[in-house]
């Protein structure tokens, strides 16, 4: 478990590691990028400065319950637009409920050539506790 100080510091620290995973009888070496996450505090700062685009990868039902103002819900149309037309150096931060699906989305966008994409650690659940307590938790 990371402390609050660790959450707010060093999130842009970038390093890579190799990990061996096993799927059934097969074993694979996986090169993992460990700079995919950013804290809610850093996210808020970048958004205030206008230095990042925040996108929500949750379901429409979850989005209806709680969302960050100005953060679009990614549907199939927006996903295609992002991949096909957004500049590959666009700073993008993905969010979900707890930060798991958004991590997958960030990894996918990296595979599509987006170099400056991060997943917000802890998702909207942490955001609603430390940044904007008016957003309901679910």
Image: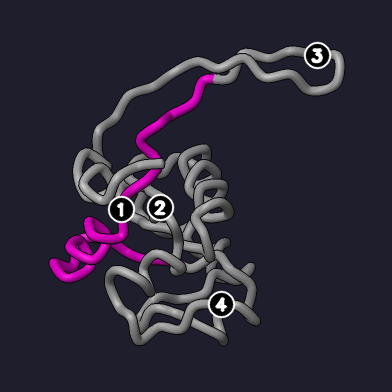
Q: Which residue is mark 3?
A: 26
Quadrant where the N terminus is found in the figure: top left
The stretch of residues the image draws in magenta is 31-55
Does the magenta run of residues contain 133? no
**Disc nearer the start of the sequence (1/4):** 1
Which badge, 3 or 4, comes first in the chain's sequence? 3
1 and 4 marks in contact (CB < 8 Å): no
- Helix, strand or loop at label 3? It is strand
Pointer 3 with pointer 4, Cβ within 8 A: no
Label 3 and label 2: CA atoms lie apart by 31 Å
In the picture of the structure, the residue carrying the numbered disc 4 is 138
Judging depth in this view, the residue of 111 and 55 nearest the camera is 55
Residue at numbered disc 1: 39
Q: Comparing marks 2 and 4, which lies closer to the viewer?
A: 4
Circle 4 — which element? loop
The colour style of the image is: one colour
Mark earlier in primary sequence (3, 1): 3
């Amino acid at each position: 478990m990371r402390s609050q100080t660790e959450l707010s510091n060093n999130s842009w620290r970038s390093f890579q590691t190799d990990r061996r995973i096993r799927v059934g009888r097969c074993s694979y070496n996986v090169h993992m990028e460990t700079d995919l996450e950013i804290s809610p505090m850093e996210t808020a700062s970048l958004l205030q400065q206008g230095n990042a685009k925040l996108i929500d990868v949750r379901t429409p039902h979850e989005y209806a319950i709680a969302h960050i103002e100005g953060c679009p819900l990614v549907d199939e149309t927006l996903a295609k637009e992002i991949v096909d037309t957004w500049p590959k150096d666009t700073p993008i931060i993905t969010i979900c409920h707890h930060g798991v699906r958004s991590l997958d989305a960030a990894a996918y966008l990296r595979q599509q050539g987006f170099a400056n994409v991060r997943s917000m650690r802890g998702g909207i659940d942490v955001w609603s506790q430390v940044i904007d307590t008016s957003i309901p938790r679910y």
